[in-house]
Image (tube, rainbow, N blue to C red):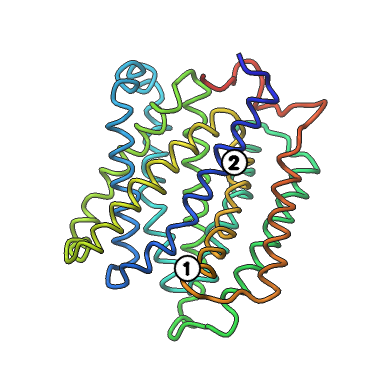
Amino acid sequence: MALPGNDRLLGILSVLVAAVLWGTTGTAATFAPEVSAVAIGAAAMGGGGLMQAMLAAGRVRRHRDQLKAQWRWLLVGAIAVAIYPLAFYASMRLAGVTIGTVVSIGSAPLLSALIEYRLDGLRLGARWMLGAGLGLSGMLLLCLAEGSGHVPAGTATGVIPGTLLGLLAGLSYALYSWTSRRLMQQGIASRAAMGTTFGIGGLLLLPILLLTGAPLLASWGNAAVGLYMAVVPMLLGYLCFGHGLARIPASTATTITLFEPVVAAGLAVAIVGERLPAMGWAGIVLILACLICISAPVGGTRPQAESPDHRPAR
């Protein structure tokens, strides 16, 4: 059996790999400009979710009685999975990429922490608060740098509804992360918990994909982008994310995924040809400081959510 410290480190590294994979989605989407953001989101989350369910079919059967006993949380998580891509991409469409991204991704760690505080009794330490503050500040600087001088036309009247949709996206992300971890804490294997949650969420997204996904079949390039999104960031990324959630709290996991926009910005500079001003590089430094702050080994007290009755499933 792995030592607790090594297990936690493995969880952190797994979530970090997921954040790297998720950070490639923006650059990948530029290779299919005629496909709408909603169609990309439905194809990625829906297709990836259904593939997760198929790969986890054996584990789901073994844990079916436990999953049935937790059906309420399972349903909540699946609905959150279906809501997330629709709210996230609609937020960017209405308020612009900068505001949509910073609200959606940046609000998730705080909302996740509030969920854990309210439902798990998790006590958030000063170091987590410092790390979250560094990460959110860095992400704000990064998004402002990416959006400086590039205010999308027509977004002025959509800022308020776009911001609200961004908060909805952040809440849904935090919620399905928490419900998935809760299933694991009840003895359900991470692959079974994530596969069932995302499989049901994928089924809920199928009607959206049928309505908006025709451009994905218009060319081999579009189809390749859709397939990449479903297989690499969503399937492999969420397998890594689920592996990490079995070992660290959801609030820590969602904070680590603030590394996603760092990867996205780096790829935009290296591949798409965008330029990142000094403010953006300062934001990257703050996000890296956040990761170091919350990932360093902890000593002494442990969160209440890590009590013997809530050990993650192995």
The three-letter amino acid code for the residue at tag 2 is Ala
In this rendering, position of residue 219 left or right of residue 80: left
Q: Which mark lies nearer to you, 1 or 2? A: 1
From the viewer's side, name the closer residue of 148 and 73: 148
Quadrant placement of the N terminus = top right
Q: Position of residue 41 (x, y in %)?
A: 35, 57
Q: Position of residue 43 (x, y in %)?
A: 29, 53
54 in relation to 259, above or below: above
Name which of mark 1 and mark 2 comes first in the sequence.
Answer: 2
Query: In the image, what residue occupies the spot 40% across and 66% down?
Result: 90
Query: In the image, what residue occupies the spot 50% across and 40% down?
Result: 177
Dot 2 crowding, Cα within 10 Å, few <14, some 14–19, many 20+: many
From the viewer's side, name the closer residue of 162 and 260: 260
The three-letter amino acid code for the residue at tag 1 is Ile
Dot 1 crowding, Cα within 10 Å, few <14, some 14–19, many 20+: few
Question: In the rendering, which numbered label is found on residue 182?
Answer: none
**Kind of element beneath mark 2:** helix
For disc 1, the marked residue is 271
Query: In the image, what residue occupies the spot 18% across and 56% down?
Result: 210
In this rendering, position of residue 216 left or right of residue 144: left
Count of labels in the image: 2
For disc 2, the marked residue is 253
Q: Position of residue 170 (x, y in %)?
A: 52, 54
140 in relation to 238, above or below: below
In this rendering, position of residue 125 left or right of residue 122: right
**Kind of element beneath mark 1:** helix
